[in-house]
Amino acid sequence: VQLQASGGGLVQAGGSLRLSCAASGGTFSTYATAWFRQAPGTEREFVAAISWSGRGTWYADPAKGRFTISRNNGKNTAYLQMNSLKPEDTAVYYCAATNRFTLATMSARHEYDYWGQGTLVTVSS
């Protein structure tokens, strides 16, 4: 499956952005999907994940209460709604997909076989 992330941009602190992850070339509805991010000089970190059905969602602590992950399998697209953005949210955001999803390993980069190209989010103070 191929993933295409979009929706990044420049926003002021306190603002909102919605990222999209469009999938093609596979049965998107059978893949769990996640968002990771990578700030300059840091490792790529887990942000949020959603089960193939959309019924289960999980968040890293920095995202809880501010970000919402969702998906529309009919449109082969996953989303990350980001509210109350902070300068420390500045990073390249990547979507990823796997059909080997487990609760124990969902935050591990190596568990995801498919990655989008990343979209840059810049939050100014």
Image (tube, helix red, strand yellow):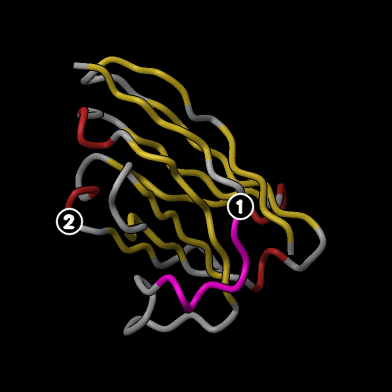
Mark 2 or mark 1: which comes first in sequence?
2
Query: The residue under label 2 is which amino acid type?
Result: Asp
Tell me where the magenta segment starts and ends, as one range.
109-116
Instruction: Classify 42 as above or below 91.
Output: below
Residue at the disc numbered 2:
61
Residue 114 falls inside the magenta stretch: yes
> Helix or strand or loop: what does disc 2 sit on?
helix
Q: Give the image location of residue 74, x and y in percent.
A: 72, 52
* 73 with respect to 24 (left or right): left
Residue 5 falls inside the magenta stretch: no
* 17 with respect to 25 (left or right): left
> Helix or strand or loop: what does disc 1 sit on?
loop
Q: Residues within 10 Å of mark 2 (few under 14, many from 20)?
A: few
Q: Residue at 58% of width from left, 35% of height from top?
A: 6
Using the rendered view, name the quadrant where residue 13 is placed.
Answer: top left
Residue at the disc numbered 1:
116
Q: Give the image location of residue 30, x and y in percent.
A: 65, 73
Q: Nearer the viewer, residue 110 or 105?
A: 110
Q: Residue at 46% of width from left, 33% of height from top?
A: 120
The N terminus - image quarter: bottom right
Q: Residue at 71% of width from left, 47% of height from top?
A: 75
Query: The residue under label 1 is which amino acid type?
Result: Gly
Q: Which of 52 and 18 is in front in this view?
A: 18
Q: Give the image location of residue 11, x and y in percent.
A: 35, 17
Image mark for residue 9? none
The residues tagged by marks 2 and 1 sit, at their Cα atoms, a distance apart of 23 Å
Q: Residue at 18% of width from left, 16% of height from top?
A: 125
